[in-house]
Image (cartoon, grey):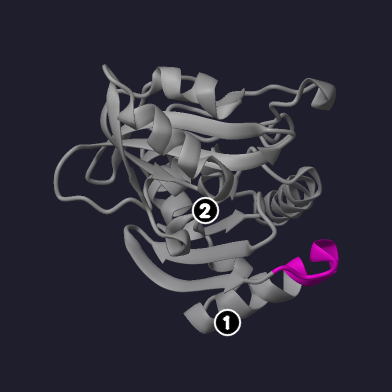
Amino acid sequence: MKILSVDTSTRHLSIAVTDGDHLVAARNVPPKRDLSLSISFDIERALKKAGLVLHDMEGFVIGLGPGSFTGLRVGLSMMKAFIMVTEKPVVGVSSLDAIALNVRSDKPVNVCVINDARRGLLYSCVYVKKGHALERKCDHLLQPVEAVLKHVEGETVFIGDGITHARDRIMDAAKLSGARFSAHFETDKHWLPKAKELARLGYQRLIRGESDNIATLSPLYLYPEDCQISKPPSPRG
């Protein structure tokens, strides 16, 4: 199954073209001034690198965030246009789930994704990762680091750009007498969501014949003023 996956939840645009579990082409683009003007060009380049065109795609996967309000809107609008043209299925995947897959381990591992949500808050979620499978241990969170740590137990790998501001507080909490967890930190090259990992999660649903309704699919907004709090499908599978 040929799949085009796109994530626009951060300032970096991530695009992947996959065929089943095989990565055919990927494009990870640094921030640009106007994503709405450049996204079509970057997707076209990724497809050209793969030797394919839009109508060759058999399914689509879109990162739902949480993250950049404007970026998520642009990405979802573009994906809706693709679905209208191709009439192929689409699934939405949390960008935090994709980041969790960036952790590489040969054994089951606890993972806590922490992305900077500003205002002293983190977008976060806690998982058990087994190979390419994720078990989510809590809801997607918008909380300060101290509240996030209440969901963390055991030896845990922290990943995400929230490490920049929260690392010292996490380490201090882990050192406390009776702490429920120990902390390890992924390097910054693994902090961003990658479309190839979105594709892994979305592919599992697509091959089961599952899809989302593009008319009602919306980004994962967690701030109350966004007035839309939606929960993407479980990453299990």
Position above or below: 155 against 10: above
Q: Single out the mark in the foreground, 2 or 1.
A: 2
Quadrant location of the N terminus in the rendered image: bottom left
The reply, left or right, for residue 168 in relation to residue 134 is right
Please state which of residues 130 and 209 is positioned toward the viewer in this rendering. Answer: 130
Q: Position of residue 210 (x, y in %)?
A: 46, 33
Q: Which residue is mark 2?
A: 193
Q: How many residues crowd around disc 2 within 10 Å: few (fewer than 14), some, or many (20 or more)? A: many
> Measuring 47% from the left and 30% from the top, which residue is drawn there?
125
Residue 187 location (% of width, % of height): 40, 59
- Asked whether 38 falls inside the magenta stretch, the response is yes
Residue 209 can be seen in this image: no
**Horizontal side of residue 237 vs 205, given as left or right:** left
Amino acid type assigned to the residue bearing label 1 in the image: Lys
Q: Which mark is residue 31?
A: none
In this picture, residue 75 sits left or right of residue 36: left
In the depicted view, which residue is nearer to us: 198 or 214?
198
**Bounds of the magenta segment:** 31-39
Which comes sooner in the sequence, label 2 or label 1?
1
The residue indicated by pointer 1 is: 48
